[in-house]
Amino acid sequence: MNNFTDFLRCIKSQPAAVAEMRGSAKHPEIRGMVKFYNARGGVLVRAEITGLPKGSGDCDSPIFAFHIHSGNSCTGNHTDMFANTGTHFNPYDCMHPYHAGDLPPLFSANGNAVLEVMTDRFAIPQIIGKTVIIHDRPDDFTTQPSGNAGEKIACGVVRKHRL
């Protein structure tokens, strides 16, 4: 995007893809949408999430790691409800935090989060069918291979948006 007008045009248009987020069995209250828009120079990602776990004090406003994973299903097993989401989406074999699927964290405000970020690390066709994950801890942007982000607490599969 070259200017603010391009940004406004992008978010007023229909997204090219969406992921409907659902919480794990331990966090069924988590819900939301992640929308992916084609934009000049990349992809605009917009996440709107509700029902995130809340902090317990003034200095405990939770931060949640937010990634696109390589798997194509929000299914798993008894120890990891979202085990089939795979690892971070990383088509170029980069070190963490330079995976194409590494996104900025979600900052919770009383259980709600909104994030908009522009990225050129992937094109929308590359992520159709991939999973979007919210983790229970912030990504430390250092630990290999995935930032020590903790348990997967919500998941959604990226689908082409139908008009």
Image (cartoon, rainbow, N blue to C red):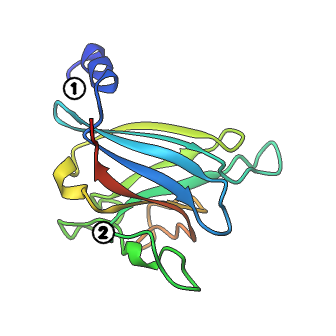
**Identity, as a three-letter code, of the amino acid under mark 1:** Met
Observer able to see residue 145: no
Q: Is residue 113 above or below residue 150?
A: above
Residue at left offset 55%, top offset 44%: 49
Residue 102: percent from the left, percent from the top? 36, 57
The circle drawn on residue 70 is 2
Quick one: quadrant of the N terminus? top left
- Mark 1 residue crowding within 10 angstroms, few (<14) / some (14–19) / many (20+): some
Which residue is identified by label 1?
1
Residue at left offset 65%, top offset 60%: 28
Residue 16 falls in image quadrant = top left
Does the residue at mark 2 contact the one at mark 1 (Cβ under 8 Å)? Answer: no
Of 58 and 87, which appears nearest the observer?
Answer: 87
* Outermost residue to the right: 57
Q: Secondary structure at mark 2?
A: loop
Residue 70: percent from the left, percent from the top? 30, 69
Of 128 and 163, which appears nearest the observer?
Answer: 163
Q: Is residue 56 above or below residue 114?
A: below
Query: Is 56 situated left or right of 91 in this image?
Result: right
Query: Is 65 situated left or right of 99 in this image?
Result: right
Residue 110 falls in image quadrant = top right
Residue at left offset 45%, top offset 50%: 20
**Identity, as a three-letter code, of the amino acid under mark 2:** Ser
Residue 144: percent from the left, percent from the top? 40, 74
- Mark 2 residue crowding within 10 angstroms, few (<14) / some (14–19) / many (20+): many
Q: Secondary structure at mark 1?
A: loop
* Outermost residue to the bottom: 78
Query: Is 18 situated left or right of 108 in this image?
Result: left
Quick one: quadrant of the C terminus? top left
Going from N to C along the chain, the mark reached first, 2 or 1, is: 1
